[in-house]
């Protein structure tokens, strides 16, 4: 599993998903969005290492052997550690909950950083009150067994149209959730943070009354001005 050191985690927590997506796109990674999910409570940010849970379509005989007791869903929850994000492959099915308040509470106690499901959640109001970031398609009162069989955990999955490997880095905010392959997370975080600083400077120029043409994106003249301003700040 990917270990996010405090410095890298802080960098990711301070960088919007939209800027991270631009850094990934520059590397040819444009299919890394978990589409269709939103934060259970607006304003929640989430950064962590992916742990995965795969749900199969409901089938009575399979649910009889895999649905009860200490099943794959509960195993996945109890396997979570500090900074992990549980990502659930629910095939985009909204007609049953995939996790409720008790298991979200357990995830929080285990030190998890959040939960993402491309299905629905139960106990939506209670989950919001727990405070752990949870991203889902919707809410639904039915239990998991109405549409799903909890099958296996910590395997490659699809969630919201994105492939998620255990150990990938998951970042979520009000714009959505993105998957960063572990091999590029450090360089993506650094590039995105640098882009965020430049974008903030561009906003300052726009607020000062400068026109967009040539400024966004910066042409050679504005790029030189930004470098000069950056060098000035570094010398202070």
Image (spheres, helix red, strand yellow):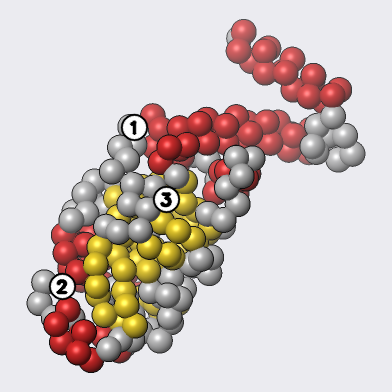
Seen at 43% across and 37% down, the residue is 183
- Residue 44 seen in this snapshot: no
Mark 2 to mark 1 CA distance (whole Å): 33 Å
| Callout 2–callout 1 Cβ contact below 8 Å | no
Of tags 3 and 1, which is closer to the observer?
Answer: 3
Label annotation for residue 170: 3
Q: Secondary structure at mark 3?
A: strand
- Categorize mark 1 by other alpha carbons within 10 Å: few (<14), some (14-19), many (20+): few
Q: Seen in the image, is 54 located left or right of residue 158?
A: left
* Residue that label 1 marks: 6
Q: Earlier in the sequence, mark 3 or mark 2?
A: 2
Mark 3 to mark 2 CA distance (whole Å): 24 Å
Q: Seen in the image, is 37 located left or right of residue 128?
A: right
* Residue that label 2 marks: 71
Q: Nearer the viewer, residue 49 or 91?
A: 91
Labels in figure, total: 3
The x and y percentages for residue 178 are: 50, 53
Label annotation for residue 220: none
Seen at 34% across and 83% down, the residue is 57
Question: Quarter-wise, where is residue 213 in the image?
Answer: top right
| Callout 3–callout 2 Cβ contact below 8 Å | no
Q: Quadrant of the N terminus?
A: top left
Q: Seen in the image, is 227 located left or right of residue 88?
A: right
The x and y percentages for residue 231 are: 67, 13
């Amino acid at each position: 599993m990917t270990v996010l050191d405090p410095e890298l985690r802080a960098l990711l927590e301070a960088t919007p998903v939209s800027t991270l997506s631009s850094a990934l796109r520059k590397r040819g990674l444009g299919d890394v969005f978990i589409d269709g999910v939103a934060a259970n409570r607006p304003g929640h940010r989430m950064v962590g290492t992916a742990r995965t849970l795969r749900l199969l379509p409901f089938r009575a005989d399979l649910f009889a052997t895999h649905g009860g007791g200490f099943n794959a869903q509960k195993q996945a929850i109890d396997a979570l550690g500090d900074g992990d994000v549980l990502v659930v492959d629910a095939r985009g099915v909204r007609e049953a909950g995939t996790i409720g308040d008790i298991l979200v509470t357990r995830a929080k106690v285990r030190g998890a950083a959040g939960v993402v499901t491309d299905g629905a959640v139960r106990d939506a109001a209670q989950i919001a009150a727990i405070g752990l970031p949870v991203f889902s398609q919707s809410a639904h009162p039915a239990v998991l067994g109405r549409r799903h069989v909890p099958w296996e955990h910590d395997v490659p999955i699809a969630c919201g149209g994105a492939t998620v490997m255990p150990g990938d880095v998951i970042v979520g905010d009000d714009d959505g959730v993105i998957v960063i392959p572990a091999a590029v997370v450090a360089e993506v975080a650094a590039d995105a943070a640098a882009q965020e600083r430049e974008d903030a400077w561009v906003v300052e120029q726009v607020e000062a009354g400068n026109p967009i043409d040539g400024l966004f994106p910066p042409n050679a003249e504005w790029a030189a001005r930004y470098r000069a301003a950056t060098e000035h700040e570094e010398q202070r």
